[in-house]
Amino acid sequence: MIKTESLTFRYPKGDEDFHFPDIHLSSEEDLLILGKSGKGKTTLLHLLAGLLQPVSGQIVIGETNTSTLSARALDAFRGRQIGLVFQNNHAVQSLTVFKNLQARLFFSKKGGNEGTINELLKELGLSELKDRKTKTLSEGQLQRLGIAMAVVHGPKVILADEPTSSLDDENCQIVIDLLKKQAAKNGANLIVITHDNRVKPFFQKSITL
Amino acid sequence: MNIWKISWANIKSKPLYSILSVLMLSLSIALLLGIQQIKTSFEYQMENNLGDISMVIGAKGSPLQLVLASVLHLDNPTGNINYGEAKKVTKTPLIKKAIPISYGDNYKGYRIVGTVEGFTDIYKAEYAEGKPFEHSMEVVLGASVAQLLDLKIGDTFQSSHGLVENQVEVHDDEFKVVGILAPTQKVVDRLIITNLESIWDVHDHDHDEDSKDHKHNDHDEHEHDHDHDHDHEHKEKEVIDYDEKSITSMLVSFRSPTAVLSLPRSINEKTNMQAALPKYELDRLYQFTGVGLDTITWIAYVILVISGLIIFISLYKMVKDRAFDLALLRTYGASNGQLIKMVTYEGLVIVVGGFILGLTITKAGLYLLLRIFENSKRQSIIMDLSLTEMLNVIGLVLVMIVLSIALAIYPIIKMNISTILSNEK
């Protein structure tokens, strides 16, 4: 469950305020956020993820009002309840696929065991690659690893920032399918921000900034 | 999974930087420790070898040479002096003890020192086996000599003339080992001690034969001895007139420190002998050798600073290059503290690696040096470094490292995750 109310944000050196429309998602509802560059799509995503704190307004995820949390509490909350998927960089380069997922679980302090990771790798078709360093993976494989990283700890919210922009049509569809499936499996809200129109048909609910 | 494992993976992912950092650090640690150790050993050795010798009386020449030859047994002596004359000037209440020493021979490069019983007391040397020499041709061995030449009580050997080993001028008379001293870490360890008569006897006998072959070819050096050769050629049992014999030098210890003001000057001015003060001469020597050691010490400091810089650059580069990785870890729920820990661990691995390697290099290097010294100087001179000096070096290195790490993690504290993540595209 996600609820935002009259969110505004201003970058320390920026001269304009971003005003964001209110979002209200019941549990397991997905949302597509569309908009041109510079409209604050990523800013909104980072606000939802707790990477930025709003100037005014509030964000409630589940039972928690994240806009009132201290920096440290926000780190912990993010680790446990948020899963982030990015366009390009998906995992730590010096670690293998498997160790990345272990690190993800370690920092989330949620526990989980090797069985969880192996099962997830199997679902995402990454079992063969588990001992490979991430820089040896292809773009499509990396994006699937990115999804694994976002869901391995069982988050309440999955936030994806342009997850399909650098993928071909086939991989684009695979990635969206996997995201929706994993979100449903975890009972999590999936929020995707993109300017990629190929993604539109997969979502019932969308807002445009 | 824990932070150590991530740090370790980071180190492994940039082997060149990591190895370079460890090597540089270990090199500077080895140099700093090594120099400290050599310096301490050198000075300790010098001070220690003085025992309670406050003045040396010998033939005129370089006072430093006289001290090196008679006190440290390193250089050649300046010449001979008359025993009677030396005894005369040392017969004053200002002088507590005057020990004559006489050179002339060596056995396999180890000097045979003719002296009197009090000589071992200068170095507080104890007997490991056997007893002091009583008769002519009986010798007591220093600990290193006995060990390296594998000589035991009752063994005999023939000396060769001069202070350097040679096969040509071997004397016929046989020395007999009657005592072996316990190790002292002092110069006496590499000496063979006998009484003065032994030295005189060996040379008297030889010159009997020499004089027949060579006539008086080398009379300038041993003229004095020759006179005596003829004197007791046929009357062996006659009491030797000690006072007319030559000795190399006289080791003197003062009864009162005020003697230093008057005695050396009066000897230097009124006799044809010279008096040298070992402490003063050795202090002069440090001043010369100190410059070299200081230079190496400065080089070691420079290397330390460079290794600090390399560690800083290596960590800083990691922080900058992996800004995205670090931001990602933050999105995984890692706190700033955890990231700082991670980078600090990386620095620590390098530091620990550097220390272990550095200490190993120091130990190995000094061991090697020790072997070389034992062969050439025939005495172990390397001392173990005191804990305080070791801690000083370690402390200095740690300050350097802490500074490097602190500078490197500063960007983490300043890091704006949102900006880094937005800039990926």
Image (tube, coloured by chain):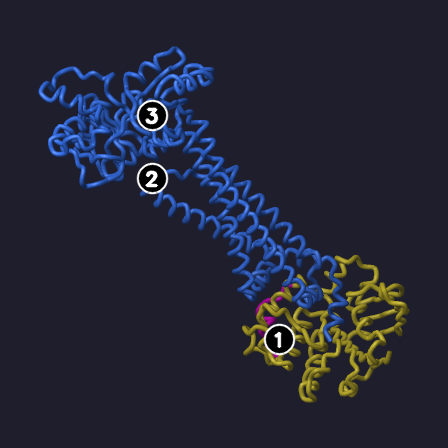
Q: Is residue A117 magenta?
A: yes
Q: Position of residue B267 (x, y in %)?
A: 39, 18
As drawn, the residue found furthest toward the top would be B93
Which chain, by letter, is blue?
Answer: B
- Which quadrant is home to the N terminus of chain B? bottom right
Q: Nearer the viewer, mark 3 or mark 1?
A: 3
Could you say whether the residue bearing mark 1 is in a helix, strand or loop? helix
Q: Nearer the viewer, mark 2 or mark 3?
A: 3
Q: Position of residue B126 (x, y in %)?
A: 31, 26
Label 1 is placed on what type of residue? Leu
What range of the chain is rendered magenta?
A: A111-123
Q: Which residue is mark 3?
A: B59
Q: Which residue is mark 1?
A: A120
Could you say whether the residue bearing mark 2 is in a helix, strand or loop? loop
Relative side of A109 to B180, left or right:
right
Taking the spot 54% from the left edge, 41% from the top edge, the residue there is B391
Which labelled disc corresponds to residue B57?
A: none
Taking the spot 52% from the left edge, 42% from the top edge, the residue there is B294
Sequence-wise, the earlier of marks 2 and 3 is 3
Q: Is residue B377 magenta?
A: no
Label 2 is placed on what type of residue? Lys
- Crowd around label 3: few <14 · some 14–19 · many ≥20 (10 Å): many
Label 3 is placed on what type of residue? Ala
Which hue belongs to chain A? yellow
As drawn, the residue found furthest toward the left would be B234
